[in-house]
Amino acid sequence: MIHLEGIGKSYKIAKRPTGLRQAAKALFYREHTTVHALKDLSFSINQGEIVGYIGPNGAGKSTTIKIMSGILVPDTGTCKIMDFIPWKNRIQYVQNIGVVFGQRSQLWWDVPVADSFELLKDIYKIPRQDYQTTLNLLIETLELQTIIHTPVRQLSLGQRMRCEMAASLLHSPKILFLDEPTIGLDAVSKLAVRQFIKTINKEKGVTVILTTHDMNDIEALAERVILIGKGCLLYDGQLEELRKRFGTHKTITVDYKKNPNPIHIPGADTISWSPHRAVLQIENMKTSELMTRLSSVVEIEDVTIESQPIEDMLVQLYKEYQI
Ligand SMILES: Nc1ncnc2c1ncn2[C@@H]1O[C@H](COP(=O)(O)OP(=O)(O)OP(=O)(O)O)[C@@H](O)[C@H]1O
């Protein structure tokens, strides 16, 4: 459905001179620097997937989303999405995609949300009947009943985000590009947005490409992740595989019947200990092996096992790749 091959994109930035003499010189001659935002980037995404597109600040995620949504033209490479070249067939192409930029609004600031939706209906030429059916569904699932007649500028960030989601889906697109959709949202709004993304993917088969710095978004939604750094692809595969390959440790919290002796298990680090609870960390040992050894020392009552938080893993990865 989405196919990118050898995509490269650079930005040319004019240097800003300091001092009067340099500023005067810049009137006649401007020096430029080039930022290579994307370098030879290739990947494919199938219909119905939810893909987490991740990487550190400045990695090139938004640039890729802008190319895939037809806003930017790459310098090199090809990008084919559902038989379209996004920036060439833009008018027909946008009928098939929805885009949400968490940091920007596609809604008209001073008018009620419902009026923005009406305008979008006309822009996308959505038949009235289809529009009404989709709108009703969106109002219900995103709980917009009480906010739809409010001007956008009076909405909270979480309320606006729900309206942005609805706006991007009014024309029933097949692909949804989400650039940091949960940025700045509280826990409840984040859960609502995540749940909604899951629902439209499952029930409508919408393909979702999601950039985010919130790894809880990724864990909740994406089985597959594409990791980029400095404009290059670093990893493309299952989140679970990423964890297996790069996750180094597990943390095990064990509750047991009162035991006055500190716990020492060879091969495991004791992070903390009390007569009722110990927190241990293992790197190269199987959890089952640890449990066997533990049960020979204490009478276990409860156990929780946590994988290394994905954030930790990424920090390590970014260090390793020097990005
Ligand atoms: N319009 C622009 N003009 C000049 N440089 C730009 C422009 N947009 C992006 N860049 C540069 O291109 C690189 C990639 O930026 P991009 O916004 O794609 O990264 P990102 O991965 O989305 O980052 P973030 O996570 O911080 O949003 C950065 O070095 C950025 O400074």
Image: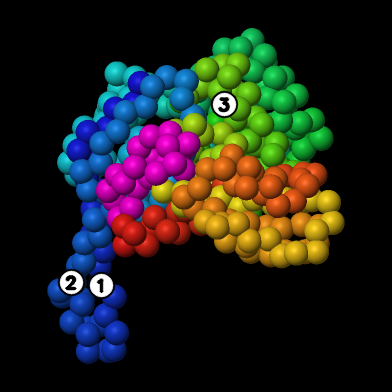
| Residue 30 drawn at (x, y percent) | 18, 72
Left or right, 238 with reference to 112 = left
Q: Residues within 10 Å of mark 3 (few under 14, many from 20)?
A: many
Which amino acid is tagged 3?
Leu
Name the residue located 56 percent from the left edge and 50 percent from the top edge: 250
Instruction: Return the disc, 2 or 3, that comes first in the chain's sequence.
Output: 2
| Residue 308 drawn at (x, y percent) | 54, 51
Q: Is residue 106 above or below residue 183?
A: above
* CA distance separating discs 1 and 3: 40 Å
Kindly identify which residue carries mark 3.
169
Q: In the orientation shown, which residue stands out farthest toward the left?
A: 29
Which amino acid is tagged 1?
Lys
Q: Nearer the viewer, mark 2 or mark 3?
A: 3
Which amino acid is tagged 2?
Glu
Kindly identify which residue carries mark 1.
15
Q: Is the image coloured rainbow, by chain, by secondary structure, or in one colour?
A: rainbow
For mark 3, give the secondary structure: helix
Instruction: Return the disc, 2 or 1, that comes first in the chain's sequence.
Output: 1
Kindly identify which residue carries mark 2.
31
Question: In which quadrant of the rendered image does the C terminus lie?
Answer: bottom left
Check if residue 231 falls in the magenta segment.
yes
* CA distance separating discs 2 and 3: 43 Å
Name the residue located 75 percent from the left edge and 64 percent from the top edge: 261
Q: Is residue 61 above or below residue 166?
A: below
In the foreground, 189 or 302: 302
Q: Residues within 10 Å of mark 1 (few under 14, many from 20)?
A: few
| Residue 86 drawn at (x, y percent) | 32, 30
Question: Do callouts 2 and 1 mark residues in contact (Cβ within 8 Å)?
Answer: yes
